[in-house]
Each structure stands twice: as C-alpha cells, then as structure tokens.
Image (cartoon, rainbow, N blue to C red):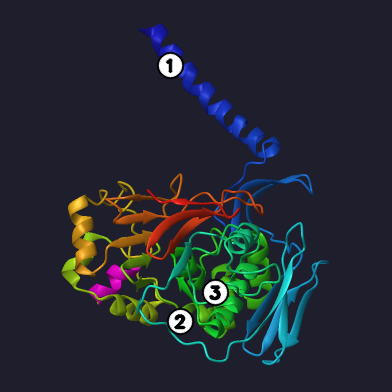
Amino acid sequence: MANLFRKVLLFIVLAIVLIPVFFVFAIRFGDLSVTDGERILLGYDEKNSRFQINEYEVFELEGNDGPYIIDNKVYSVDSANNFQVSDLNAHDAYTVLVQNEDKDQFSFLLDQNASPPDSEYIMPDKLLAVSDIEGNFDGFYSFLLNNDVIDEHYNWTFDEGHLVLVGDFVDRGNNVLPVLWLIYDLEQQAEAAGGMIHFILGNHEIMNLHGNFKYAEHKYRKVAELIGGKDDLRENFKTLFASNSVLGEWLRSKNIIEKIGDYIFVHAGLSPEILPLNISLAEMNSLLRANIDKNLYHKPQENEKANFIMGRKGPYWYRGCVMNYKYYPRITSEQMDSVLNHYGSKHLVIGHSVVEDVSSRYNGGLIRIDVKHGQTKNSGETKGLLIEMGKQYKVDDLGNKSDLL
C-alpha cells in the first residue's frame, strides 16, 4: 500500500513539473498561444525573443483593404500599408483592390436608393443560391463567372435571374470588403437588368454589427483600431459596419428570411418551436431590423418574439435542421412538414451547418448548401444550388451541373 502511495505521489509530482514545462515548450517552439482575441494571456514574441503574459495583442495591416465609407470619409489601406483618409464624393466611382494572386480589381458607384426588400417573391425562371463564402473572393468570383452570373469584367450577365446569398459572407477570409462591395455593385446591375440579388443575413453578419471580432482576420481588427480610435476593440470593430457607414446601413436593410416561389431561404433553419409564436416571414424581418443592434442572444428583453428570433433557436442560429445540437435535438420529419406547411412552402434552403455536398433531406423538404468551399478560383469545390425552370441542380465553380437527388 505504501509503495502504491509513493508511486501515485511521484506521478502527481512529475505531472506538476512536466506539464508546465511541456506547455512552455509548446508556446516557445510550437507557435501556440493562449488568447481571448484581444489579449495574449500567454505567448511568445518571436520578433523580440520574449514571452508575453497578459498583453494586448498587436495587430498589423496586411496590404490593400477598403474602402470603408463612414459618414463623409473614405478610409483605405494601400499595398505598402499606408492608412489613407479622404473626403467622400458620392458621385465618384470607388475602386476595390482584391488581395489575391491575380490582383483583381473592380469599381462601384454608391447606391442612393437602397431600401428594404420584400419578404416574398415569385419564382423566376432561374435562381442560383450559395452560402457561407466568408470573405473568399476567389471561390465566389469563379462560382459567379462559371455559372454565367457575371463576365470577367464583373458585369451582371444573369439577365432576369435571381441570385440568393444565404448568409455568412464575412469573417474568416481576407477579402471580406471585396466580397461585400462586389455584391453591393452587382445588386444595382441586377436590378437594372430585371434580375435581383437576395442577401439573407447570417449569424456572422449580425456578429459583425455587434462588434464581435472573434472570427475576423487580424488586419480588420487593426483597421478598426485606426478608424475607431478607442481603447475597446469591440467598440472599434463596430465602427466598420456601423449604421453611419455605407456597408453598415446596407446590411441593416437586408432580411433574415425570404420566400421565393415554393422555397424559403434562411441562413440556419427554422425551429418547430417558432410555430406557437405565429410569426410571419415579414414580421421576422421587421423584428430583426428593429433589434439588429441589440444583443438579445445574451441579453434578452421583454419582447418574446424578438428574443426568439435573435436567440439560439432563431433563424440565423438554429442547427436542428441538420444535427442534434447541445441545446436541442434534430428536427423530425413530422416537424419539418409542420414548419413547411405553416409557411406555405415545399422547400427550406439553408446554409450555416457544413455538409459534405449540396444535398437534400426530408423528401426534398430541406436543401443544405453550406459546403467547404474551395479557396482558389476554379477549384470545383465551391458549390451551390441552381433552380432552373422548376428543376433543382447542384452546381460548382467550374460550371458543372448535376441533378439534385
């Protein structure tokens, strides 16, 4: 018994000694750090050859970025990391420089007539949907180009077709601004041609409006610091898409759910628990716009419907259409039918939860389009949904098209 006690004691002593040593070596030589996104709790500064304990992270600019148009100022970063500020001229065309191998660029004009879209539309002859691009300009560009939505010069070529963007076009990638400005520009072109772009907000768009920088590349945290000028990184990050910015005002005009023909498009899904609340699609969008700057997810208020729409089971957070989740089980076939019947729809199209391929479930009632997109042009891995003359196809950024079974 004494020998066993000594062995256990020795094991505990070794663990106490060796685990911290291993952890220190991992931080020093394994590029490991402990951070909360704003402070480095424990890390190693290679440049100055020293350990870091509870220090603010230092973020750097990383080349071309912008423009950020806020109030009457235009902020941008050039290829030499010079931060530039100029006065806004609402009639100028502004150039966007993409950070990619091809050094793509395009220009846009400001839209003076942006207004909230409707919640329901008639199905067009052709509709293309894609989700969760997350600042991936190359994959997005080749997907649009090879599915005849645009030409090589960023001109809309989809005629009267509709392009549906099912949320999460920001965060993670390093070309968030080019992706957003391209959508912004194409929206105007589509309208002029008789077509339309439907930008459905996802949880990451909402998180950005709330100043949540957790998934943003470091360069966006730095430019937020330069524009915001405050000590609080969250407050600085809010300035990038604040209501007094062009992109912030534009995003705030968008919907979280739309019905086009027999199809409902929503970022995450619809929980069956929404049915007793009897919230129409239009009311969901109105509730979102009225509460978009409130963090009802973490700080609910008295409005039960608003709390649900902005909460963990709301349309841009709910994962139960795809999986058992920590807060709820996966939706059943009967519940899916109830949701679809309640909203007079035959199909629910969602992103948010990654699946292996564009696919359907529940006898075609659910269509899942969030896949792991390719990070380069013409990878064949950036995929979406095409609905053409009533038929459903899965398509990729090489222009391949196959029946959605």
Q: Amino acid at mark 1?
A: Val
Side of 372 relative to 329 (left or right): right
Q: Which sits in the foreground, 5 or 35?
A: 35
Disc 2/disc 1 C-alpha distance (Å):
63 Å
Above or below, 305 relative to 319: below
Instruction: Tell me the mark number nearer the camera, choosing from 2 and 1.
Output: 2
Any part of residue 380 in sight? yes
Any part of residue 268 in sight? no
Give the residue drawn at x 61%, y 78%.
Answer: 185
Side of 336 relative to 107 (left or right): left
Q: Which residue is mark 2?
A: 253
Kindly state the secondary structure of the residue where label 3 is placed: helix
Q: Mark number for residue 8?
A: 1
Give the residue drawn at x 16%, y 68%.
Answer: 276
**Principal secondary structure, stretch drawn in magenta:** helix
For residue 304: magenta?
A: yes
Q: Amino acid at mark 3?
A: Lys
What's drawn in magenta, residue-wise? 303-310
Give the residue drawn at x 73%, y 59%.
Answer: 100
Residue at the right extreme, as displayed: 80
Disc 3/disc 2 C-alpha distance (Å):
17 Å
**Percent x, y of residue 287:** 32, 79
Side of 148 relative to 331 (left or right): right
**Percent x, y of residue 250:** 52, 81
Query: Which of the 4 image quarters holds residue 231?
Result: bottom right
**Percent x, y of residue 363:** 27, 50
Above or below, 96 relative to 219: below
Q: Which residue is mark 3?
A: 238
